[in-house]
Image (cartoon, rainbow, N blue to C red):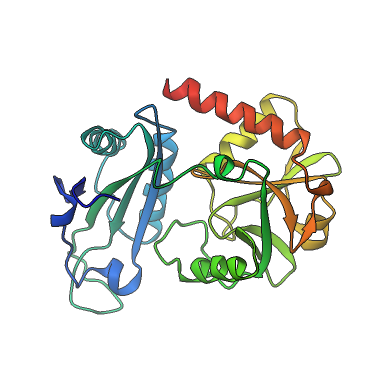
Amino acid sequence: MKMNATGYVNGEFCDLADAKISILDRGLLFGDAVYEGVRVNNGRLFRVGDHYARMSGGLKALGILVPFSASQYETILTELARRNGVQSGLVYIQVTHGAAMRAHVPPKEITPNVFAFVQTGEALPSWPRQYPGGVAVATVEDLRWQRCNIKTTMLLANTLAKRQATDAGAFEAILVGQDGTVREGALSNLFAVIGGSLRTHPADSHVLPGVTRKVVLDLARTHGIPDAERAFSKEELLAAEEAFLTGSTADVCPVVSVDGKPIAAGRIGPITARLMKMLAEVLQAETA
């Protein structure tokens, strides 16, 4: 990320190198903050309304004032992408509870801090383009908190899981709950084709309701691909006909092995390939 890029802080566009937030900010002290990374393609935002809905819902769940309307949110992110000349990449936006003397309960009169910056496609490449043959994943115990449906900045457990998977020679960590159910990736949602049906964990408090996840489910239902939002086990994942990850940088990214064991002989499956193509078509159509 270039430090001479333009950022946004509390209503003002500024040089990123000059952007500043108080050291008493609750996002820094407590992880008391919510963030979004909105996809940019052809210079246009993808599914920005879904990102706004998820962010505003997360802010309300944490008791943080929503500091902008949906139209203001879109205007800020669009202008930031324009000022940075971003054709392909992400606009990252974070809202914290605000700055106050350190105390577990924030004061009632506190103003949220808002900041945003861009990451270009060169710095944030698409996973399928990086790994056209698919990726290896490793299962890791899910040690996160119980409100994973809120996209907070408390990502230490995700970071440690990703590092554990990397140390095992895998690209992504797949988080498995104490009940044995497979939940999602450290940075992505997970799908598997089991018995001919597309399966993914239901959108409860154990997983993030991904924007790309929603697009993929909508595509499956529109095009007659059987699906079920139903949890499955690690054993079912290992025996699956296909598996793939989804996310704003993952798109639809095929999984070809789990814990060193190949999925469907280590090849990209037909449903995965079909959804990869359909998602690319939707992205292009909506951002042309």
Relative height, residue 54 to residue 237 (above, below) = above
Seen from the viewer's position, the closer of residues 227 and 264 is 264
Residue 176 appearing in the image: no
Q: Is residue 215 left or right of residue 224?
A: left
x, y (%) of residue 64? 30, 58
Seen from the viewer's position, the closer of residues 70 and 80 is 80
x, y (%) of residue 20? 16, 60
Image point (41%, 54%), residue name: 58
In which quadrant of the rendered image does the C terminus lie?
top left
Q: Within the image, what quadrant is residue 185 found in?
A: bottom right
Q: Is residue 79 left or right of residue 187?
A: left
x, y (%) of residue 167? 60, 70
x, y (%) of residue 28? 29, 70
Image point (80%, 40%), residue name: 197
Image point (30%, 51%), residue name: 1
- Number of marks in picture: 0
Relative height, residue 187 to residue 109 (above, below) = above
Q: Is residue 234 left or right of residue 69?
A: right
Q: Is residue 162 left or right of residue 99?
A: right
Image point (86%, 43%), residue name: 195
Residue 241 appearing in the image: yes
